[in-house]
Image: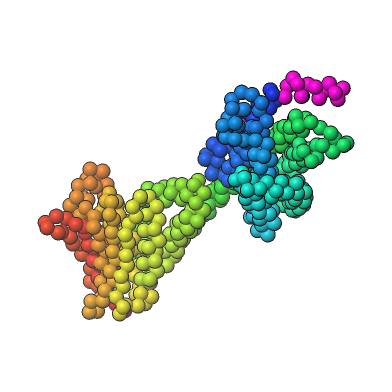
């Protein structure tokens, strides 16, 4: 029976099996290379290299046809087969280290597996080049004889390390790797020629092909398992996100209810307190319009989808600071100038998420001024910055907004200037859009300043900036008393 099987392999089907396997290897190489460009996962790239070098190793075994002619053209022979066999065996270790993310779990384990592989690849390449140059075949032959033993020892060490890696996908890799490694060893001349085996070259190749098929099935199952894990993680994340959003909605409703109750109590105490509370509520409701929140969240979502974790976390933190500042401002009657300017800086950073070319935003404070001692109503400057962005610089390529804080005699002067389209053009744009948000926002800010400082203690002035009779922006000047 064994003799009949050997005859079938040796005489009848070897060529067909070889071409089928080589075609499959080439397709696998191209397929995983495409997956790499789609997903940017290096494990696909390494597996593509692994299958490609396997293809190169067994291409010289083709006795006729296109691959045979191609092998002769590139001078691929039995020596080339030996060299490429060493390379693809080494690439397999690099592949599963990347696939299982060993470096994230232990850098030391990663180095123990990877560094010897690079050394083996280097020695194989150098000795093969010496062989091909015609200097000597002694070095390559010597290395080729000891390579099976070196790679066997390294396999035992690497798979021992894998047993300590907490990743269920490792069992696919270990199983497929062991099967392929055993089949690869049997295919070696020094192994298959042993008396108790005594296999021909074609039988050795057939055994290797069988191991390669098992190994690829194992990897396909591993890939499918990883995709299933990723899917379940996404489902769990979305479920958690929905639950958190529901909790946030409930918390928002609770906060709104408590806020309304507090305002009612204040309204019953004194008319002045009622005016302050109404102004606070109005300014809060107009601080962050829905377009800003929608654009900011969309920009943050873009960074999350692009796996740009650093930017996503950075801007999400800034966005939460703005929201927290709004909630805090509803419970206090004043901010320091330092708090106000910091809040404006975070606000501009968030607005910048939606612009390809960001706003050049600068704050300059006179050295004589202690910004932690100056007090003013909370979030009162935000309206002017929002107007400068929406109605001034939003449509420009080169966007600039400056805040200059100066001391002028016994009052503080806050200058907010932009290089926008000017008030005249902005008014036309608002009329076209039927938008009166600017006048409402500045009216609320004016009322807050009046209630805080008194009607005679502050001033708001507007200036149109020009150059060569052309509008070059707007400046808003706020004068408030210095304590």
Q: Which quadrant would residue 58 be assigned to in this image?
A: top right
Q: As drawn, which residue projects farthest toward the left? A: 469
Q: Nearer the viewer, residue 126 or 377?
A: 126
Q: As drawn, which residue projects farthest toward the top? A: 12
Q: Nearer the viewer, residue 363 or 341?
A: 363
Question: Which residue is at a point 81% across and 32% down the rendered structure image?
Answer: 199
Q: Position of residue 346 (x, y in %)?
A: 40, 61
Stretch of the chain drawn in magenta: 1-14
Name the magenta segment's main secondary structure.
helix
Q: Position of residue 114 (x, y in %)?
A: 66, 53
Q: Position of residue 332 (x, y in %)?
A: 42, 67
Q: Nearer the viewer, residue 106 or 353?
A: 106
Q: As drawn, which residue projects farthest toward the front? A: 135
Image quarter in which the N terminus is found: top right
Q: Nearer the viewer, residue 289 or 264?
A: 289
Image quarter in which the C terminus is found: bottom left
Question: Which residue is at a point 27% across and 54% down the rendered structure image?
Answer: 398
């Amino acid at each position: 029976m064994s003799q009949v099987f050997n005859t079938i392999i040796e005489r009848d089907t070897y060529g067909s099996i070889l071409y089928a396997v080589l075609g499959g290897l080439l397709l696998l190489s191209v397929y995983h290379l495409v997956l790499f460009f789609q997903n940017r996962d290096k494990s696909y790239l390494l597996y593509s290299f692994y299958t490609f070098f396997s293809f190169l190793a067994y291409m010289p075994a083709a006795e006729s046809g296109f691959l045979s002619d191609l092998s002769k053209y590139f001078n691929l022979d039995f020596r080339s087969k030996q060299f490429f066999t060493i390379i693809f065996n080494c690439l397999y270790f690099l592949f599963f280290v990347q696939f299982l993310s060993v470096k994230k779990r232990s850098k030391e384990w990663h180095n123990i597996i990877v560094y010897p592989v690079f050394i083996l690849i280097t020695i194989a390449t150098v000795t093969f080049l010496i062989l091909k140059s015609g200097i000597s075949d002694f070095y390559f032959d010597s290395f080729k004889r000891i390579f099976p033993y070196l790679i066997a020892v390294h396999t035992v060490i690497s798979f021992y390390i894998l047993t300590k890696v907490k990743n269920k996908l490792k069992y696919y890799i270990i199983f497929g790797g062991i099967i392929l490694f055993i089949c690869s060893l049997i295919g070696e001349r020094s192994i298959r020629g042993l008396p108790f085996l005594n296999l021909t070259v074609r039988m050795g190749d057939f055994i290797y092909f069988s191991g390669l098929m098992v190994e690829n099935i194992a990897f396909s199952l591993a890939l499918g398992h990883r995709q299933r894990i990723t899917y379940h993680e996404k489902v769990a994340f979305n479920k958690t996100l929905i639950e958190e959003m529901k909790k946030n909605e409930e918390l928002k409703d609770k906060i709104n209810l408590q806020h309304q109750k507090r305002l009612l109590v204040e309204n019953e105490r004194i008319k002045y307190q009622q005016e302050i509370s109404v102004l606070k509520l109005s300014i809060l409701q107009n601080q962050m319009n829905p377009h800003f929140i929608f654009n900011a969240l969309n920009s943050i979502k873009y960074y999350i989808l692009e796996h740009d974790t650093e930017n996503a976390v950075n801007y999400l933190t800034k966005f939460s600071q703005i929201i927290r500042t709004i909630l805090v401002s509803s419970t206090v009657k004043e901010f320091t100038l330092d708090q106000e300017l910091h809040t404006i800086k975070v606000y501009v950073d968030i607005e910048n998420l939606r612009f390809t070319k960001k706003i050049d935003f600068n704050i300059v404070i006179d050295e004589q001024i202690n910004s932690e001692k100056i007090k003013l109503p909370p979030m009162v400057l935000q309206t002017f910055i929002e107007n400068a962005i929406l109605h001034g610089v939003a449509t420009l390529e080169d966007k600039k907004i400056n805040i200059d804080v100066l001391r002028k005699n016994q009052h503080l002067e806050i200058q907010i200037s932009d290089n926008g389209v000017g008030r005249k053009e902005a008014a036309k744009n608002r009329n076209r859009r039927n938008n009166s948000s600017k006048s409402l926002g500045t009216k609320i800010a004016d009322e807050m300043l009046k209630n805080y400082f008194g009607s005679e203690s502050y001033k708001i002035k507007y200036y149109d900036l020009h150059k060569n009779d052309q509008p070059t922006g707007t400046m808003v000047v706020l004068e408030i008393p210095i304590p």
